[in-house]
Image (tube, grey):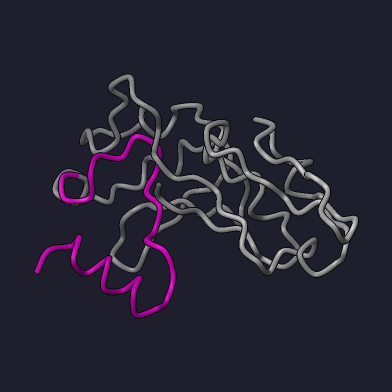
Amino acid sequence: MSMVYDERRRSFLRGRQLDIRPPWALDLEEFFKKCSSCQQCLEACPEGILSIDGFGYPLVDFRQGECTFCGKCEESCPEGALLNVGQGPWHHKAHIAEGCLNSQGTLCRTCGEECGAGAISYPLQDNGFGRPLLDRQRCTGCGACLPVCPVLAITMTMP
């Protein structure tokens, strides 16, 4: 079986989204073919948000912070598994779930305060609170909003 199948199966069984590979990672099949698990991208990441999965491959851990898309991981990859060909670093976008404190009548704006792209606004609702509204066009998928959410109501999803 392929690594892509194994990863998707693992994620499904754990009941969570797929692991997010470093910015500019090739599609999963090509990424697993080219990545030698050398970990040079981990050493190059100034934000320290890259870690290793159970198979030795790099992935992004937004609990450690946000991605600034500096490109150091891509520059350090000797195998070409991370390749910036003028497209965006990835297609992931934030998703704010119903478990958000504002949905429960508790004022919280931490995700919007951390969003450098200004992709999160708080239009007022009937209860007087503004539930976060994500503008997917403005969201860069940097992950700045994830570690600051006190109830872990934010995840990354593919469009």
Q: Quadrant of the N terminus?
A: bottom left
Q: Residue at x 42, y 76 (%)?
A: 15
- The magenta segment is 1-30
Q: Residue furthest top?
A: 86
Residue 14 vs 86, above or below: the answer is below
Q: Where residue 24 appears, x then y in whole percent?
A: 34, 34
Residue 36 vs 98, above or below: the answer is above
Q: Residue furthest bottom?
A: 13
Residue 59 appears left or right of 4: right
Residue 71 appears left or right of 81: right
Q: Is residue 25 magenta?
A: yes
Q: Where residue 126 appears, x then y in whole percent?
A: 85, 58
Q: Nearer the viewer, residue 28 or 72?
A: 28
Task: Choose top left, top right, bottom left or bottom right for residue 101.
Answer: bottom right
Q: Nearer the viewer, residue 148 or 81?
A: 148
Q: Where residue 7 appears, x then y in whole percent?
A: 27, 66
Q: Report the number of discs.
A: 0
Q: Residue at x 44, y 45 (%)?
A: 92
Q: Residue at x 17, y 43 (%)?
A: 34
Q: Residue furthest left?
A: 1
Q: Is residue 88 magenta?
A: no
Q: Residue at x 81, y 54 (%)?
A: 125
Residue 138 appears left or right of 16: right
Task: Choose top left, top right, bottom left or bottom right for residue 54.
Answer: bottom left
Residue 31 vs 15, above or below: the answer is above
Q: Where residue 139 appears, x then y in whole percent?
A: 56, 36
Residue 125 appears left or right of 159: right
Residue 126 vs 7, above or below: the answer is above
